[in-house]
Amino acid sequence: MSTNRLPAQHDDFPAWYVEVVKRAELAEHGPARGSMIIRPHGYAIWELLQRALDDRFKATGHENLYFPLLIPMSLLQKEADHVEGFAPQVAVVTHGGGEKLEDPLAIRPTSEAIIWSTYKRWIQSYRDLPLLYNQWVNVLRWEMRTRLFLRTSEFLWQEGHTAHATSDEAVEESLRMLEVYREVAEDVLAIPVFKGRKTAAERFPGAVETYCIEGLMRDGKSLQCGTSHFLGQNFAKAYDVTFLNADGVAEHAWATSWGFSARMVGAAIMAHGDDAGLRLPPAVAPIQVAIVPIYRSDDERASVMEVAEKLRADLAALGVRVRLDDRDQHRPGYKFAEWELKGVPLRIELGPRDVAAERAVIARRLEGDKVEVALADIASGIPDRLASAQRGLFADALAYRDANTHEITSYDDFASGVEEQGGFWRGAWCGEGSCEAEISAATKATIRFLPTEPTVPGAPCMHCGRPGVEVATWARAY
């Protein structure tokens, strides 16, 4: 671990982010352009996120399956809007076994094409519906500008793909899964998010409607934290997926897809981190409590380690993810700094005097303070302390977002504000794509979301002055 201070967030947020990811041993760049090696500490966060999502998927009736990585280009090209939207990002295998392939193979940028060409065989009657499936996979999108976790060419995610007998059922599914994403973002990652829908320009290729959750990072930029798409019958028509309804009439199935990726590890870093490093929500902290024994001699070591090991066992029995840092090659001060950098919510410091006094010191990462607690009371009190840290991180992030969410009083106010302050800016918009594009070109801000249900603002568009038809929330974004 480097002993140099991290760049300050307010001086250079991107540099701070990169250094935290590397020094906290979350990830590093892979040998191929845009690839990422996720180290154990970073992958453990993803595993905890994955578990939280997967439990909720199964609780809402979904099952996991797996589809191949390679998709024949002839399949991908059947859905023209989908292909056009992803064309710049698709990587293609043209040779295999030393020979040129007659039908090149796309490395999946997403799986609608291969899944819906398969659903054609699985769906014949309304009795076969709904299909509620999800898969945990990697995907590849040929990104031009990459950043660890936030945007890499290859990344980990889940993608749900469901088929329904009616439009209403599919829309209901899209919104149900959006709520699952909100719950995980807020209750697990402690990141407050706004729910909404995307404009046509920001919509997923081939979707009728894209719903999203958006969070605000500590540099005032927005991050898309998850999306859920109502696909209408577009993919069913492209791949001729029909079923006989209860009246014996053939219809095309209605579809959804939804995805939540490992970029949310990056979101947790940027939404909660400070100049000392990570501040991980206990729900996804691989190590919730680090015990650091302090001693100078073998005798002191023996007495301190005996108490520390009992404390570790007591915490583990309570289901706490605890690490007893018994490395003799590092001094206590080094260990303190390391666990602070890595975002461990609670650190217990235990020395010979503490053992003699039957007490220990608890260092709280969120508050940045230390409190003395009787040894007899430490283990039983840790779950409540972790719950308090989880709530505290959410409250802190919510206060930051609220302080940086603004109502637009004029275009000039918005343009200067989004440049100087960042944050979310909410105001009336005419609904015209040309107006949206002009604003984005001038301010580098995009419409991050519209209300989930269309809302007439009762005011003219903040840019062109035409009647406002939507309340749009703008921000600069990752």
Image: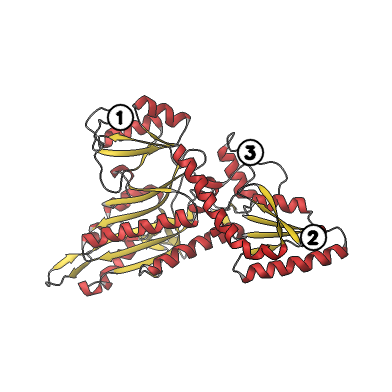
Disc 3 marks which amino acid? Pro
Disc 1 marks which amino acid? Met
Q: Give the x, y percent position of residue 328.
A: 80, 60
Disc 2 marks which amino acid? Ala
Disc 1 or 3, which lies upstream in sequence? Answer: 3
Q: Secondary structure at mark 3?
A: loop
Gap between marks 1 and 3 measured at Cα: 38 Å
Determine which quarter of the picture holds residue 168: bottom left
Disc 2 or 1, which lies upstream in sequence? Answer: 2
Residue 74 visible to an observer of this rendering = no
- Would you name the residue on which mark 1 appears? 462
- Would you name the residue on which mark 2 appears? 357
Residue 37 visible to an observer of this rendering = yes
Q: Secondary structure at mark 1?
A: loop
Q: Give the x, y percent position of residue 391.
A: 52, 53
Gap between marks 2 and 3 measured at Cα: 40 Å
- Would you name the residue on which mark 3 appears? 7
Closer to us: 151 or 417: 417
Q: Give the x, y percent position of residue 184.
A: 45, 57
Q: Give the x, y percent position of residue 264.
A: 49, 53
Q: Are marks 2 and 1 in contact (CB under 8 Å)?
A: no
